[in-house]
Image: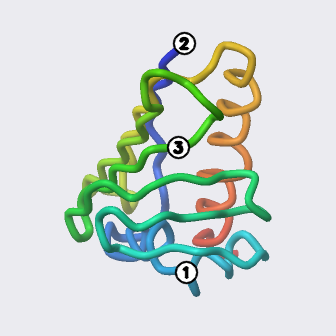
């Protein structure tokens, strides 16, 4: 199991980034796909045609999201924590993803950089 920590600067205020991560309609805008998402702790979520599934654990509006991501029958849960901080260019998103299965690590890291935060950054970029 491996952990991944990174920071992403997103050109939007924290409340907009929070919506991009938690609001199903906003998520659909930047992913182009249907999604199941709720801000109710204990609810399950699904994104990218069910290639990402998990449980929502904790929310602090406009500041923090904690989720458990499912990877089959692993003993220790894979936990994603995203903290949003105001930044002079918009928002600094602090990501910590723990207990990623070794065989999935490279794909998960690429997904965070390109498909997840890369897509959110592109969504908020103004031409």
Task: Specify whether 124 is left or right of 87.
Answer: right
Residue under pointer 1 = 24
Residue under pointer 3 = 69
Q: Residues within 10 Å of mark 2 (few under 14, many from 20)?
A: few
Kindly identify the residue that appears in the image at 31 percent across and 54 percent down.
57
Nearer to me, 68 or 125: 68
Please, what secondary structure does the residue beneath circle 3 have?
strand
Q: Quadrant of the C terminus?
A: bottom right
Mark-to-mark CA distance, 1 and 3: 17 Å
Kindly identify the residue that appears in the image at 26 percent across and 57 percent down.
58
Q: Earlier in the sequence, mark 2 or mark 1?
A: 2
Q: Which mark is residue 1?
A: 2
* 84, above or below 62, in the image: above
Q: Quadrant of residue 48?
A: bottom right
Q: Quadrant of the N terminus?
A: top right
CB atoms of marks 1 and 3 within 8 Å: no
Q: Position of residue 65 (x, y in %)?
A: 33, 56
Mark-to-mark CA distance, 2 and 1: 30 Å
Q: Position of residue 9 (x, y in %)?
A: 46, 49
Please, what secondary structure does the residue beneath circle 2 have?
loop
Q: Residues within 10 Å of mark 1 (few under 14, many from 20)?
A: some
């Amino acid at each position: 199991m491996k952990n991944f920590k990174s920071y992403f600067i997103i050109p939007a205020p924290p409340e907009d980034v929070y919506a991009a991560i938690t609001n199903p309609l906003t998520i659909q805008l930047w992913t182009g796909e249907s999604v199941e998402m709720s801000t109710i702790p204990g609810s399950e979520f699904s994104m990218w045609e069910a290639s990402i599934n998990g449980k929502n654990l904790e929310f602090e509006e406009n500041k923090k999201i904690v989720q458990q991501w499912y990877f089959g029958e692993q003993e220790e849960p894979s936990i994603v924590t995203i903290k949003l901080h105001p930044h002079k260019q918009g928002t600094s998103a602090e990501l910590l993803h723990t207990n990623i299965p070794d065989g999935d690590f490279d794909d998960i890291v690429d997904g965070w950089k390109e498909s997840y935060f890369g897509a959110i950054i592109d969504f908020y970029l103004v031409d």
